[in-house]
Amino acid sequence: MQRTSIEINYSSQEGVIARYAKALSHPVRVRILRFLDCQSCCFTGELTEEIPMAQSTISQHLKELKEAGLIQGDVMPPRVKYCINQKAWEEAQKAFAVFFDR
Amino acid sequence: MQRTSIEINYSSQEGVIARYAKALSHPVRVRILRFLDCQSCCFTGELTEEIPMAQSTISQHLKELKEAGLIQGDVMPPRVKYCINQKAWEEAQKAFAVFFDR
DNA sequence: ATTGTTCATCGCAAATAGACGATGAATCTG
DNA sequence: CAGATTCATCGTCTATTTGCGATGAACAAT
């Protein structure tokens, strides 16, 4: 939106927190991550069975999680295997831990 | 939105995470919380000096944080003193810690 | 009583997010 | 080559979020 003339400079930490928080701000995405956490990996199809929403909707949520860096998808035709991105996961974990630790 | 006929049941943990994450999903709100964390408490006016946005906008973000339970406002006419809600803060801290701890 | 201060809320406009069905790309199988 | 399978993307619709200025409420001080 950004209609202010003044440039807003968010410190790095604020941006990182906000970005990861946004990825976690929808119950379905939290659910997907928890599912991936248990299974270690899964195909899109397993999620569409697990979660009662249109396949296209699940796919969009996966895209957002991927763009946030929290998951990665390996193409294994004709399927795609999704896993949690270890590195980003730990970065997020740390960011939230630091943020909440007062 | 909810256009699916099927009822979606989110486990409690998913809802809690999503709710707090949503509150943290905007850089300004993260910034407000960090400011409150440092100052322990502050008035709205201090935030409008700190953050270059319209007073009404800051006020809205405060409202969202309040509705998420993360802060509380004590009316001290003509001002309002905002503090972090200790209890909710710790609940959120724990929820994220549990979520990320695999 | 009038004025000033501080803040919330309203009303609007623009942007973003969420959901769906339909379609398309890529790859197997027969 | 002709289906079948799996998934992403597109287009569309609606809902929500974000931002602003303007206005109003509550109180203090004059």
Image (tube, coloured by chain):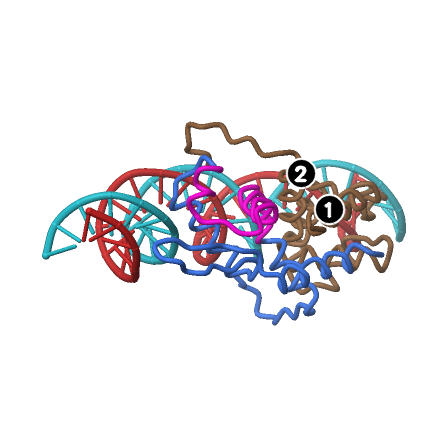
Chain colours: A brown, B blue, C cyan, D red
**Total labels drawn:** 2
Mark 2 Cα-neighbour bin, 10 Å: few <14, some 14–19, many ≥20: some
Viewer-closest of B54 and A48: B54
Name which of mark 2 and mark 1 comes first in the sequence. Answer: 2
Q: Which residue is mark 2?
A: A13
Residue at image position (48%, 37%) is B51
At label 2, the amino acid type is: Gln
Magenta region, mostly helix, strand or loop? Answer: helix
At label 1, the amino acid type is: Val
Residue A21 located left or right of residue B64: right
> Do the residues under discs 2 and 1 have CB atoms within 8 angstroms?
yes
Q: Is residue B31 magenta?
A: yes
Q: Which mark is residue B45?
A: none
Viewer-closest of A55 and B36: B36
**Residue A92 coordinates in the image, percent (x, y):** 74, 45
**Residue B46 coordinates in the image, percent (x, y):** 46, 43
**Residue B63 coordinates in the image, percent (x, y):** 46, 55
Q: Quadrant of residue B20?
A: bottom right
The magenta segment: B23-50
**Residue B13 coordinates in the image, percent (x, y):** 70, 66
Depicted A17 relative to depicted B19: above or below: above
Disc 2, SS: helix
Depicted B57 relative to depicted A29: above or below: above
| Chain name for mark 2 | A
Residue A101 located left or right of residue A4: right
Q: Which residue is mark 1?
A: A98
Residue A71 located left or right of residue B80: right
Q: Is residue B7 magenta?
A: no
Measure the C-alpha gap from mark 2 to mark 1.
10 Å
Residue at image position (83%, 48%) is A83
Residue D5 located left or right of residue C30: left
Residue at image position (81%, 48%) is A84
